[in-house]
Image (spheres, rainbow, N blue to C red):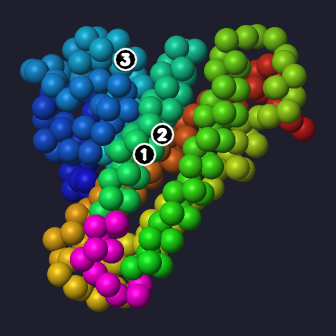
């Protein structure tokens, strides 16, 4: 979850050391579609073994460690495609793991706790999931395919005249706010009724989700959007 150290990631750093300092990097590995067995690999060795662009891995791992870049290097098209696949893979994680996990906890909570606030929490959570799934589907169906097509062609397309990275940025909503509200409800307003352990599990899962969503948003806003916008500008396809 939340780390206290800010270990700066370099090619020589041990993967085991990184994960021990910040266990949330295990989720980062999953978003790169790799497993958590890192052997005695350094960052450089791990990236080589898994065919991950080292510069992208280091950049993302530093963001997960709370270190935001002040300037961006040049990226190849392959680097950018890896970034997009990373973000798309994180959507799979949210939709198939974290959201069902939290839902199952809330359903159990309704069995342990008969307070009138519990049905409201369930409704609130389902509304949140519907809203965030709409946002993720927009990225999967519209933004990511556009970015991939931008990387694969040098020519103007009809899609490039209808969409841009700046439009993506404007559409990028804050999907973390409602999670914070849900945490506040559980921490402040719902009376305990034999659900102490379960409530702790829900809150831990919410904190984990909130943290990773924040990393997801930072990568989109600080890295992907500026990089894609720069490519558009080079090709003079930006909307006026």
Answer few, some or many: residues within 10 Å of disc 1's Cα (few below 14, many 20 plus, some between 14 and 19): some
Instruction: Determine the residue positioned at 25% across, 72% down.
Output: 199
Q: Secondary structure at mark 3?
A: loop
Q: Quadrant of residue 96?
A: top left
Vertically, is 77 above or below 102?
Answer: above
Vertically, is 223 above or below 76?
Answer: below
Q: Which residue is under mark 3?
A: 52
Q: Which residue is under mark 2?
A: 91
Residue 58 shown left or right of residue 168 in the figure: left
Answer few, some or many: residues within 10 Å of disc 3's Cα (few below 14, many 20 plus, some between 14 and 19): some
Of 45 and 33, which appears nearest the observer? 33
**Whole-percent x and y of residue 226?**
63, 36
Q: Which residue is under mark 1?
A: 94
Q: Secondary structure at mark 2?
A: helix
**Whole-percent x and y of residue 112?**
24, 77
Vertically, is 188 above or below 132?
Answer: below
Does label 2 or label 3 sit earlier along the sequence?
3
Q: Quadrant of the C terminus?
A: top right
Residue 147 shown left or right of residue 183 in the figure: right
Q: Are marks 2 and 1 in contact (CB under 8 Å)?
A: yes
**Whole-percent x and y of residue 216?**
47, 44
Q: CA distance from mark 2 to mark 1?
A: 5 Å
Instruction: Determine the residue positioned at 81% across, 26% down.
Output: 160
Does label 1 or label 3 sit earlier along the sequence?
3
């Amino acid at each position: 979850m939340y780390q206290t150290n800010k270990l700066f990631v370099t090619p020589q750093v041990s993967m085991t050391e990184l994960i021990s300092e910040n266990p949330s990097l295990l989720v980062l590995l999953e978003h790169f579609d790799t497993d958590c067995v890192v052997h005695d690999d350094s960052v450089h060795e791990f990236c080589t073994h898994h065919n991950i662009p080292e510069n992208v891995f280091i950049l993302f791992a530093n963001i997960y460690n709370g270190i935001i870049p002040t300037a961006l290097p040049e990226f190849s098209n392959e680097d950018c495609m890896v970034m997009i696949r990373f973000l798309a893979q994180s959507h799979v994680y949210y939709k198939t793991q974290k959201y069902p996990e939290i839902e199952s906890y809330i359903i159990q909570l309704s069995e342990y706790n008969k307070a009138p606030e519990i049905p409201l929490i369930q409704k609130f959570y389902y509304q949140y999931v519907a809203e965030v799934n709409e946002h993720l589907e927009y990225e999967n169906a519209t933004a990511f395919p556009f970015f991939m097509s931008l990387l694969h062609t040098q020519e103007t397309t009809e899609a490039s005249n209808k969409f841009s990275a700046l439009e993506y940025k404007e559409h990028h909503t804050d999907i973390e706010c409602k999670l914070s509200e849900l945490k506040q409800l559980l921490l402040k307003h719902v009376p305990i009724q034999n659900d102490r352990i379960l409530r702790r599990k829900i809150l831990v899962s919410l904190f984990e989700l909130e943290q990773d969503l924040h990393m997801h948003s930072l990568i989109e806003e600080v890295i992907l959007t500026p990089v894609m916008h720069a490519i558009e500008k080079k090709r003079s396809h930006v909307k006026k």
